[in-house]
Amino acid sequence: MKEDNRLFARILIPVDGSKFSLKAVRLARRLAEIQGSELLLLHVLDVEVIEQLCRLSNKSNDEVRADMEGSARAFLEDMSLEVSRQNIPVSMVLKEGTPHEVVLDEAVRWGADLIVMGKLGKRGVSRILLGSVAERVIEFANLPVLLAIA
């Protein structure tokens, strides 16, 4: 059996559509080029944001969810192109839930060795009380987390 000496064979990249997500994807791509890693792009449809948008608009839960899902899929495709041009194995996942919880669950499920994410990623109005998604992921992660900030 061949031993795998890569430090980061599987890198999870939570993306939220922000410029910081793009920076995280580019950083993870560079690491993947060096390490020979595979990447997983993850976008989480935040259930709290969906509820807030339903309350603020005349749209149903299903309409809001469909709009957000369409935007998320387009963003994931764009980020995938950013990586796949370098012939790096990349997969995409779209899930729904509380972002930091889904990120941590997906890291375990997929067997990630590293999470690379942008420094922001706020959750709706409650961001003032709860902090950013990145802060929550760092607080509860059982694997290394690398933040892209510049």
Image: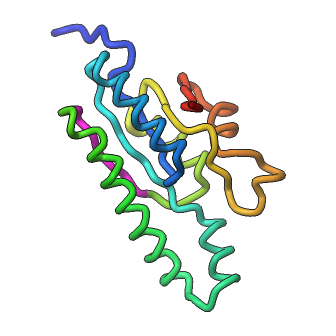
Between 106 and 92, the residue placed more toward the observer is 92
Residue 73 visible in the snapshot: yes
Tell me which residue sits at (46%, 26%) in the image: 114
Q: Position of residue 39 (x, y in %)?
A: 33, 35
93 magenta-colored: yes
Q: Is residue 38 above or below residue 7?
A: below
Residues 106 and 133: in front is 133
Question: Splitting the image into 4 quarters, where does residue 22 fall?
Answer: top left
Q: Quadrant of the C terminus?
A: top right
Residue at point 33% right, 53% down? 78
Q: Residue at position x 26%, y 12% from top?
A: 4
Look at 68% across and 74% down and name the residue there.
Answer: 52
Magenta segment: does it hold 132?
A: no
* 10 displayed left or right of 18: left
Give the residues in magenta.
Answer: 88-94
- Determine whether 42 is above or below 62 in the image: above
Q: Quadrant of residue 89?
A: top left
